[in-house]
Image: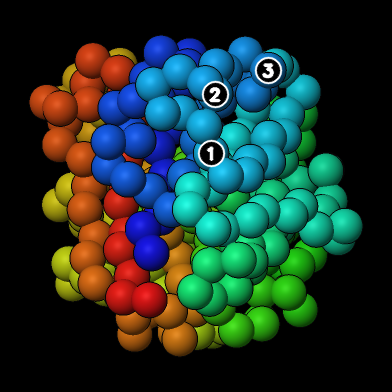
């Protein structure tokens, strides 16, 4: 099973073929336009299933599945926590709970970015504690910015997830420490000297044991399409 997250910087319809060449089973696309704007009959874009959520038809959160996987947005979804979508994924070799994340809520005075993830992991705590759980997407955060976010900061989120036996696939695979990542996922304004690691895939320990590989897209390959590089995680399932 291959899960990919990639913030496409809008206009996904013009870029979909590039990320689909990586052959995802589940694809999470922050800053994705509404599916009505996508031509699913062109260039092999058609997914088996999809969920899209947002208030701006040009810039929401899209989740697409390929093969036998089916997606269902759960009734427990709290639209006030933007944008974190609790999804049930079924139909493949394993069923699991997927939290698709684009941490971005400018209207929330308590915190627009990592605070949204903090709120989500507390609000959905019982659901997160179920087996086979994945939280993946653009968290808009890194440990280096902890002081800006007080209690509900990046380290607090990581610690709380680890307490629930949910871990970052990138950090486990590459044996990296939070805040010192060697592989950036964001190149702000596409500048190499403004690079940060802000996109993540966290999985429960039962899935972590099945992790096969983690790949971060190369800057030179993806810079013409987005200031983000994709995170590609493959599991032996």
Q: Nearer the viewer, residue 171 or 133?
A: 133
Question: Dot 2 surroundings within 10 Å: few (below 14), some, or many (20 or more)?
Answer: few
Say left or right for 6 vs 37.
left
Question: Dot 1 surroundings within 10 Å: few (below 14), some, or many (20 or more)?
Answer: some
Q: CA distance from mark 1 to mark 3?
A: 13 Å
Q: Point out the residue furthest to the front here.
A: 41
Point out the image quarter for the N terminus: bottom left
Q: Earlier in the sequence, mark 1 or mark 2?
A: 2
Q: Position of residue 228 (x, y in %)?
A: 33, 31
**Considering only vertical position in the picture, is 130 above or below 21?**
below
Residue at the spot of label 2: 40
Q: Residue at x 46, y 28 (%)?
A: 45
**Considering only vertical position in the picture, is 194 above or below 181?**
above
**Considering only vertical position in the picture, is 59 above or below 25?**
above
Q: Position of residue 212 (x, y in %)?
A: 24, 72
Q: Position of residue 119 (x, y in %)?
A: 72, 57
Q: Residue at x 35, y 35 (%)?
A: 20
Residue at the spot of label 1: 47
The answer to whether any part of residue 194 appears in the image is no
Q: Residue at x 42, y 44 (%)?
A: 5
Q: Are marks 3 and 2 in contact (CB under 8 Å)?
A: no
Q: CA distance from mark 1 to mark 2?
A: 8 Å
Residue at the spot of label 3: 36
Q: Nearer the viewer, mark 1 or mark 3?
A: 1
Tag count: 3
| Colouring used for the render | rainbow
Q: Are marks 1 and 2 in contact (CB under 8 Å)?
A: yes
The answer to whether any part of residue 56 appears in the image is yes
């Amino acid at each position: 099973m291959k899960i990919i997250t990639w913030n496409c910087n809008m206009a996904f319809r013009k870029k979909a073929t590039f990320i689909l060449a990586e052959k995802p089973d589940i694809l999470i696309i922050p800053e994705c336009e509404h599916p009505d704007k996508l031509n699913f009959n062109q260039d092999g874009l058609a997914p088996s299933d999809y969920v899209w959520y947002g208030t701006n038809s040009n810039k929401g959160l899209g989740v697409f599945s390929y093969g036998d996987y089916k997606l269902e947005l759960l009734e427990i979804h709290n639209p006030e926590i933007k944008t974190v979508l609790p999804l049930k994924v079924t139909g493949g070799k394993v069923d699991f709970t997927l939290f698709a994340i684009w941490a971005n809520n400018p209207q929330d005075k308590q915190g627009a970015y990592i605070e949204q993830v903090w709120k989500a992991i507390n609000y959905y705590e019982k659901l997160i504690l179920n087996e086979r759980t994945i939280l993946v997407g653009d968290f808009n955060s890194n440990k280096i910015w902890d002081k800006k976010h007080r209690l509900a900061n990046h380290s607090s989120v990581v610690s709380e997830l680890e307490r629930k036996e949910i871990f970052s696939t990138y950090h486990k695979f590459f044996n990296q420490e939070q805040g010192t990542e060697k592989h950036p996922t964001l190149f702000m304004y596409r500048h190499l000297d403004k690079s940060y690691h802000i996109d993540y895939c966290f999985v429960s320990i039962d899935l972590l044991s099945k992790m096969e590989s983690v790949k971060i897209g190369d800057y030179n390959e993806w810079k013409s399409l987005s200031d983000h590089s994709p995170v590609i995680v493959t599991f032996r399932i």
